[in-house]
Image (cartoon, rainbow, N blue to C red):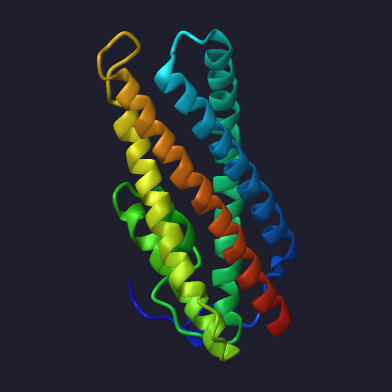
Amino acid sequence: MSVRSARDRPGAFEAPVNLARRGRWARISLMLVGLLSLARTVITLFLAFDWEMLGWQFAYRVASNWYAVVVLVCFTTFILWVHGAHRNLFAFGTTSRFSDAASVYWWLVPFANMVVPYKVVEEIVDSMEARVNSQERTKKRARIWWMLLVGGVVLHFVSVSLPLPGGGGFAFALLVEAVSAAALAVAALLAVRLVRRVTELQIGYF
């Protein structure tokens, strides 16, 4: 990954991306993920103590099915927002270690996607806060967001690898899933604040 500036990028002086629409859709999908994650936390906790509650089993399956769909939509809208925000860095001559394409494809590379996408977001946050001489703790919140996101995803995969219903460790698996869902709920809400902050800064700048 080489450091690039607007001068090195073909078409660098084209019109910047207007993040208003991308930011709005990203925030909406993130809020839906946060609400569904919170619902999954509550439902999973009930099931951890009484799996035989058929009503909660049904609610769990419905929430899980919708959750998968909403997470996919959120993943898409958030990456589009990151791509637009990163592309705008070149519009005012900021250097970057990543190309526009890299701000997208690193999310899809196993293991590397646990670190590199955060570095892209970190560059965006650092650049915007520095340009307005802001004292906002956006970078700190971004770091907490990423730790909760990665931790929540890892815990989810741990929970699905644990025993199925009927096994002695199934209640523990559900508790792990509840912690995962809670972490992802908080991560989603922090991401909403992050998207709003960066979008406002870039719209105000341009």
Q: Residue at x 50, y 34 (%)?
A: 41
Q: Nearer the viewer, residue 119 or 176?
A: 176
Q: Residue furthest front?
A: 49
Please state the horizontal and vertical placement of residue 177, each as a whole percent of the image: 40, 32
Give the number of callouts: 0
> In this rendering, is residue 73 above or below 49?
below
* Left or right: 97, with 46 as reference point: left
> In this rendering, is residue 168 above or below 152?
above
Hey, which quadrant is residue 172 in on the image?
Answer: top left
Please state the horizontal and vertical placement of residue 189, each as a whole percent of the image: 57, 54
Hey, which quadrant is residue 164 in on the image?
Answer: top left
Hey, which quadrant is residue 158 in on the image?
Answer: top left
Q: Nearer the viewer, residue 38 or 10?
A: 38
Image quadrant where one finds the N terminus:
bottom left
* Left or right: 204, with 84 as reference point: right
Q: Residue furthest left?
A: 168
Note whether residue 206 is visible.
no
Q: Nearer the viewer, residue 168 or 90?
A: 168
Q: Residue at x 61, y 82 (%)?
A: 91
Note whether residue 90 is visible.
yes
Please state the horizontal and vertical placement of residue 103, each as a whole percent of the image: 47, 63
Image quadrant where one finds the C terminus:
bottom right
Q: Residue at x 34, y 21 (%)?
A: 171
Q: Residue at x 37, y 50 (%)?
A: 150
